Every structure is written in structure tokens, then in C-alpha cells.
Image (tube, grey):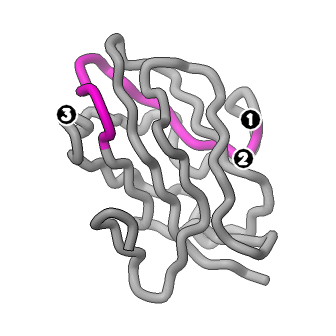
């Protein structure tokens, strides 16, 4: 369990992005947390937990396997992060690349940044395939 965040049954923590800056549109790579190289991010198993600040504009964007919003979309580019309204508030974005075999490190890249300071810890759970 990670500060009150438990992986769904049968899944492991694949990647984490600590203190993701939700006020920028630049690429922010995740940190790999498992020993394998092949993974499947699974639907309904991503959690963004507000660390500081609060949502105040149309903050949205996705997670990709390539820099500059390229590669496979793991989380849609239209994902809203509006639920990050206060410390410990959570958003559970949908995984759109579930049932996929992926190898690349995920990268958060917002299309619209929050207009004030906002950070979140983002956890991606799923299955290690090797």
C-alpha cells in the first residue's frame, strides 16, 4: 500500500510520477517500479493523488509512450484532471491502451496546463508480462 493507495487485486505498481507539475505542458517521464520490460497498463487502475495546490482551469492531457505527445496513448489527451481540487483529492483516469503489450516508459504531457501551482502523484498499475 502506498500512503493509502492499494493496487487492485492481481496487479502491481508499474510506474509512478511523484510531484507531477500540472501547471506545465512539457514532458514529464514516469519512474519504472517493476523488474520486467513488457507491461500491460490495465483499465481502471491509474490514480492521481493531489499533492499540493488545487485545480482552477481546464487542466487536461494524457500519458504517452513517446516524447512530445507521440507513441501509444495510455491515457487520453482529453483526460480532465479537474478532480484534483485539494490535497489528497483523487482522479482515476481511464486507461485507453489496456490489453496492450508495451515496453516504453510512460510520459505525462498535458495539452492544457493548470494556471496555478498544482502537483500530483500519479500511479499506473497493471501486469508485468515477462
Can you say which quadrant of the picture contains the N terminus?
A: bottom left
Disc 1 on helix, strand or loop? strand
- Which residue in the structure is indicated by mark 2? 65
Residue at mark 1:
70
Q: In the figure, 82 relative to 89: above or below? A: above
**In the rendered structure, does residue 51 fall within the stretch colored magenta?**
yes
What residue is at 66 percent from the left and 40 percent from the top? 29
Which residue is pictured at 43% across the width and 27% down the height?
22
Closer to the chain start, of discs 3 and 2, is 2
Left or right: 105, with 62 as reference point: right
Question: Which callout, 3 or 2, points to the residue nearer the camera?
Answer: 3
In the image: residue 13, left or right of residue 59: right
Q: Position of residue 45 (x, y in %)?
A: 43, 66
Q: Which residue is mark 3?
A: 85
Contact (Cβ within 8 Å) of mark 1 with mark 3: no
Where does residue 49 sit, x and y in percent of width and height? 33, 48
Residue 57 position (above or below residue 79): above
Relative placement, left or right, of 125 versus 92 is right
Residue under the image location 24 percent in, 27 percent down: 54
Extent of the magenta region: 50-66
Q: How many marks?
A: 3
Amino acid at each position: 500500500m502506498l500512503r493509502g493507495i492499494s493496487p487492485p487485486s492481481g496487479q502491481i505498481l508499474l510506474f509512478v510520477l511523484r510531484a507531477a507539475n500540472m501547471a506545465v505542458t512539457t514532458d514529464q517521464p514516469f519512474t519504472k517500479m517493476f523488474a520486467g520490460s513488457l507491461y500491460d497498463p490495465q483499465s481502471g487502475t491509474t490514480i492521481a493523488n493531489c499533492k499540493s495546490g488545487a485545480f482552477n482551469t481546464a487542466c487536461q492531457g494524457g500519458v504517452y509512450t513517446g516524447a512530445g505527445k507521440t507513441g501509444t496513448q495510455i491515457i487520453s489527451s482529453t483526460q480532465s484532471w479537474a478532480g484534483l481540487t485539494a490535497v489528497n483529492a483523487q482522479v482515476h483516469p481511464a486507461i485507453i491502451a489496456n490489453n496492450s503489450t508495451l515496453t516504453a516508459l510512460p510520459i505525462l504531457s498535458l495539452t492544457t496546463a493548470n494556471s496555478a501551482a498544482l502537483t500530483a502523484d500519479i500511479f499506473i498499475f497493471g501486469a508485468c508480462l515477462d
